[in-house]
């Protein structure tokens, strides 16, 4: 057992499962113990279960659908913008634009949403574009880093095969790194998911998981809040799993 | 062994490459001609040896048109014209280049990569397929034709990279340290590959660098030592050709490795240590 506490030690599959099992058990025990008695920080498992039932009866599935739709719309637009900017960033004239877009990730949300509110009247469109603006800056940053990590040998190899510069861009960067783009989307998806509560509170009528959590927060319904946190986490992890699965299934050569 | 030299195949004059203030190579001059032997198709095998950091890779990148020389010119025989002695300046893609890592397109299988290399050739789809399959068979890659680079062994990657360049480029191929990190079997594979290339066409010319001096002496018919020259008693910090061993003139080319070859190895090592 001593070896389980040694850095860089390789462990068997069974030992790994045992470690995970012990940690899950510890979390559950902590949850049960900390939610007992009159005064407690976390709601009891029973309260959370009640929260789940209430949420389901209030149309949790529809709200999940609404959040997913919002996310997919925003991601699609953001990915298209980021990819165009990033691929074109290999052209010297466009490079500063791409780099500036990447730096804009340090801008605060309030300022951006203020100007977006002036430009966009429809609240649902507003939600989408707030997410698009933020997602684009993060995606562009990751995609620029993806391009800069391509070894010079790959460009030279394409050039030695009589590829002109546009062919090099197409073969090495665009076609040669599609799997990396999926990985970048997967890693940045957490940002959209994290901003869900803020963005969905802009338009209450459209519903969504963010709206539900805001609503539960207002009435201090702890059971519902934790139940929603669990739902948001599970939906996020599911999308993460699906994207990872798609990358491995469609791109056999992808070993990221 | 009887031989004669004909058309100039490679002409390098006053070549220098500098990055900003730093001159990497300077005053590189050499000429290589088509070597002709009776009843024998003989391609050219040219080796460049020298200690690390002397500019071999930079010279190769310049020779393959991947970087623009600061001064000088590199001419190769223009084999596409009717005239025998036409020459042209080197551009990207004129000379095949296989780097140390045997880089391939990571998203193309062996077959797809070779098909891509043939994309500019004016032949039918069926002819392309036949040509690719013939190469795959000759080079022992038939079984891995649908595998991606990450699924190939080092030797298979290297052979794929060489065939890719043969199919795409003309008669010239530059290989940067093709023997580094290879086991005995793979070294034999590369030697066989050299033989295959040079026995296919008179003009086929292999230019390679290596740290294995014995292999340079065994395989090459022309060896150039790149090093820092000593001028007026002071060693400079740019690379240039410090010595040339013409193995043909020395009557050592195309022969089994023997005592005379060992003597050349000693001389090359001494030259390298002093430059």
Image (cartoon, coloured by chain):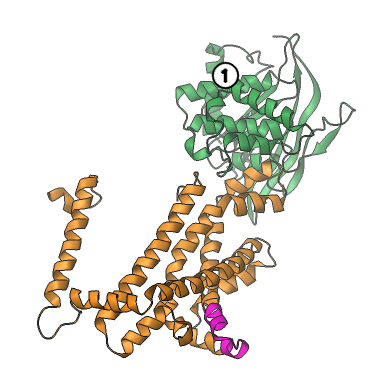
Chain colours: A orange, B green
User: Where does the N terminus of chain B fall, quadrant-wise?
Assistant: top right
The furthest residue to the left: A37
Residue positioned 45% across, 87% down in the render: A204
Q: Can residue B266 be seen in this view?
A: no
Q: Give the range drawn in magenta.
A: A115-130
Query: Vertically, is A13 above or below B32?
Result: below
In the rendering, at what x and y percent does residue A82 appear? 59, 67
According to the picture, the residue beneath numbered tag 1 turns out to be B218
Residue positioned 87% across, 26% down in the render: B84
Tell me the crowding category of disc 1: few under 14, some 14 to 19, or many 20 or more residues within 10 angstroms, Cα based: some
Secondary structure at numbered mark 1: helix
Query: Vertically, is B84 above or below A230?
Result: above
Horizontally, residue B69 falls left or right of residue B80, namely: left
Q: Which of A143 and B115 is in front in this view?
A: B115
Q: Which of B25 and A72 is in front in this view?
A: A72
Q: In which quarter of the image is residue B30?
A: top right
Query: Vertically, is A189 above or below B262?
Result: below
Which SS does the magenta portion mostly show?
A: helix
Residue A117 lies in magenta, yes or no? yes
In the rendering, at what x and y percent does residue B96 appear? 68, 35
What chain does mark 1 sit on?
B
Q: Quadrant of residue A42?
A: bottom left
User: Where does the C terminus of chain B fall, quadrant-wise?
Assistant: top right
Horizontally, residue A173 falls left or right of residue A142, namely: right
Query: Vertically, is A75 above or below B93?
Result: below
In the rendering, at what x and y percent does residue A54 appear? 29, 79
In the rendering, at what x and y percent does residue B123 appear? 78, 31
């Amino acid at each position: 057992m001593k070896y389980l506490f040694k850095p860089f030690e390789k462990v068997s599959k069974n030992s790994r499962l045992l470690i995970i099992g012990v940690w899950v058990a510890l979390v559950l025990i902590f949850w049960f113990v900390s939610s007992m008695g009159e005064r407690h920080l976390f709601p009891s498992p029973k309260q959370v279960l009640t929260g789940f039932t209430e949420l389901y009866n209030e149309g949790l599935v529809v709200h999940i659908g609404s959040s997913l739709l919002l996310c997919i719309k925003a991601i699609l637009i953001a990915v298209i913008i980021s990819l165009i900017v990033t691929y074109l960033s290999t052209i010297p004239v466009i490079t500063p634009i791409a780099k500036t877009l990447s730096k804009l990730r340090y801008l605060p949300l309030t300022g951006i949403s203020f100007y977006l509110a002036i430009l966009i009247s429809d609240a649902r469109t507003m939600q989408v574009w707030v997410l698009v603006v933020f997602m684009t800056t993060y995606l562009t940053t990751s995609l620029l880093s993806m391009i800069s990590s391509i070894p010079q040998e790959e460009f030279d190899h394409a050039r030695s095969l009589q590829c002109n510069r546009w062919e090099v861009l197409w073969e090495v960067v665009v076609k040669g790194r599609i799997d990396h783009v999926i990985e970048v989307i997967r890693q940045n998806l957490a940002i959209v998911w994290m901003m869900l509560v803020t963005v969905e509170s802009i338009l209450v009528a459209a519903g969504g998981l963010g709206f539900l959590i805001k609503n539960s927060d207002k009435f201090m319904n702890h059971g519902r809040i934790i139940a929603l946190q669990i739902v948001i986490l599970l939906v996020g992890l599911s999308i993460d799993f699906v994207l990872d699965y798609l990358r491995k299934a469609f791109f056999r050569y992808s070993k990221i | 062994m009887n031989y004669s030299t004909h058309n100039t195949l490679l002409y390098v004059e006053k070549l220098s490459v500098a990055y900003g203030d730093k001159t990497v190579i300077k005053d590189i001059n050499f000429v290589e001609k088509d070597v002709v032997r009776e009843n024998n198709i003989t391609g050219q095998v040219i080796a460049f040896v020298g200690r690390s950091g002397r500019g071999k890779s930079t010279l190769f990148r310049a020779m393959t048109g991947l970087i623009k020389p600061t001064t000088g010119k590199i001419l190769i025989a223009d084999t596409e014209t009717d005239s025998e002695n036409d020459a042209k300046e080197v551009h990207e893609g004129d000379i095949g280049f296989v780097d140390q890592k045997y880089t391939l397109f990571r998203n193309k299988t062996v077959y797809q990569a070779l098909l891509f290399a043939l994309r500019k050739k004016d032949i039918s789809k069926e002819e392309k397929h036949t040509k690719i399959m013939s190469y795959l068979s000759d080079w022992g890659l038939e079984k891995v034709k649908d595998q991606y680079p990450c699924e190939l062994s080092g030797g298979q990657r290297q052979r794929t990279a060489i065939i890719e360049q043969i199919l795409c480029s003309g008669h010239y191929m530059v290989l940067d340290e093709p023997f580094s990190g290879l086991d005995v079997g793979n070294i034999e594979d590369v030697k066989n590959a050299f033989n295959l290339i040079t026995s296919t066409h008179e003009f086929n010319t292999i230019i390679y660098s290596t740290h294995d001096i014995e292999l340079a002496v065994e395989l090459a018919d022309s060896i150039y030592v790149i090093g820092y020259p000593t001028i007026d008693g002071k060693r400079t910090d740019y690379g240039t050709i410090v010595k040339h061993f013409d193995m043909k003139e020395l009557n050592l080319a195309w022969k089994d490795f023997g005592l005379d070859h060992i003597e050349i190895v000693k001389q090359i090592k001494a030259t390298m240590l002093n430059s």
